[in-house]
Image (cartoon, rainbow, N blue to C red):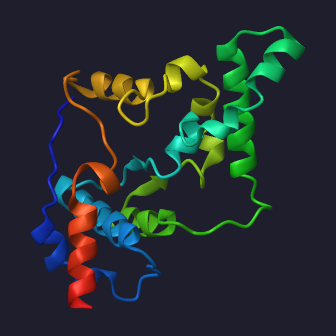
């Protein structure tokens, strides 16, 4: 299996801001989500493949918020199960509630990610939009899927990356809004320009 590092620079994002015209974009995160996916898939030269996106993955893995585990002691006592089993049950319930189609939620950036994927002739698979395809991940034991200490200790991510090629354990995982600086840089640029 060949891995290819795809890099999208700040200058490329600025040069392609015209691509967001007419899109339902309401935040800097939405601008970045769309352009990073669109440009990244163009560079990867993919066609007619499934693209698994992580929008909603924190909810899927149970690493979004600690409050979802508030019932852990109650479940442990009532069902006489370990802490890991109780936390797995908690994250499964939270994901089930979060993906309930009868509850109206904000759109976030997932609609833009789907557009970018489809515009590159691929099939989008997202945790919030395609529960039937990916719910099995949510049923993984808490200790395997999460291990806490967001975001750098998400065990499942490391296993996938390791499976796909060489995983350097010295690398730290981060999120775009806090770890790369591109979010703040683009926010400053857009505020100044527009």
Q: Is 186 placed above or below 70 here?
A: below
Up-down relation of residue 140 to residue 182 (above or below)? above
Residue 108 lies left or right of residue 9; in this view the side is right
**Residue at (14% x, 53% y) in the render:** 7
Say if 67 sits above or below 75 in the image: below
Q: Is residue 18 visible?
A: no
Asked whether 187 or 143 is in front, the reply is: 187
The answer to whether 158 appears left or right of 128 in the picture is: left
Residue 154's quadrant in the figure? top left
Task: State left or right for residue 141 relative to residue 193.
Answer: right
Tell how many labels: 0
Q: Is 158 rendered above or below residue 119?
A: above
The quadrant of the picture occupied by the C terminus is bottom left
Instruction: Provide residue 67's location: percent of width, then percent of height.
Output: 66, 39
Q: Position of residue 81 (x, y in %)?
A: 77, 10
* Residue closest to the eye, 98 or 42: 98
Identify the residue at horizontal 27%, vertical 48% (top origin): 179
Q: Please give the name of the residue rendered at 71% of the width and 41% of the height, measured from the top-left corner.
A: 94
> Taking 166 as reference, is 21 left or right?
right
Find residue 189 and report its image quarter: bottom left
What percent of the width, then of the height, locates residue 122? 38, 58
Q: Position of residue 129 (x, y in %)?
A: 60, 55
Q: Quadrant of the N terminus?
A: top left
Residue lying at 77% horizontally and 62% vertically, measured from the top left = 103
């Amino acid at each position: 299996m060949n891995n290819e590092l795809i890099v999208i620079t700040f200058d490329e994002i600025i040069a392609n801001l015209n691509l967001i015209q007419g899109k339902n974009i309401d935040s800097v995160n939405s601008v970045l989500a769309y352009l990073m996916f669109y440009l990244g898939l163009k560079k990867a030269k993919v066609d007619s493949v499934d693209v698994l996106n992580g929008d909603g993955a924190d909810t899927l893995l149970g690493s979004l918020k600690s409050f979802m585990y508030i019932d852990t002691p109650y479940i442990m006592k009532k069902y006489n199960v370990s802490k890991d089993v109780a936390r797995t049950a908690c994250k499964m319930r939270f994901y089930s509630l979060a993906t309930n189609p009868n509850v109206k939620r904000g759109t976030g950036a997932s609609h833009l990610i789907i557009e970018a994927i489809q515009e590159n002739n691929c099939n989008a698979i997202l945790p919030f939009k395609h529960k039937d395809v990916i719910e099995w991940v949510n049923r993984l034991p808490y200790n395997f899927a999460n291990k806490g200490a967001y975001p750098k200790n998400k065990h499942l991510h490391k296993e996938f990356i390791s499976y796909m090629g060489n995983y350097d354990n010295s690398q730290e995982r981060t999120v775009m809004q806090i770890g790369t600086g591109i979010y703040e840089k683009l926010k400053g640029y857009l505020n100044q320009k527009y």
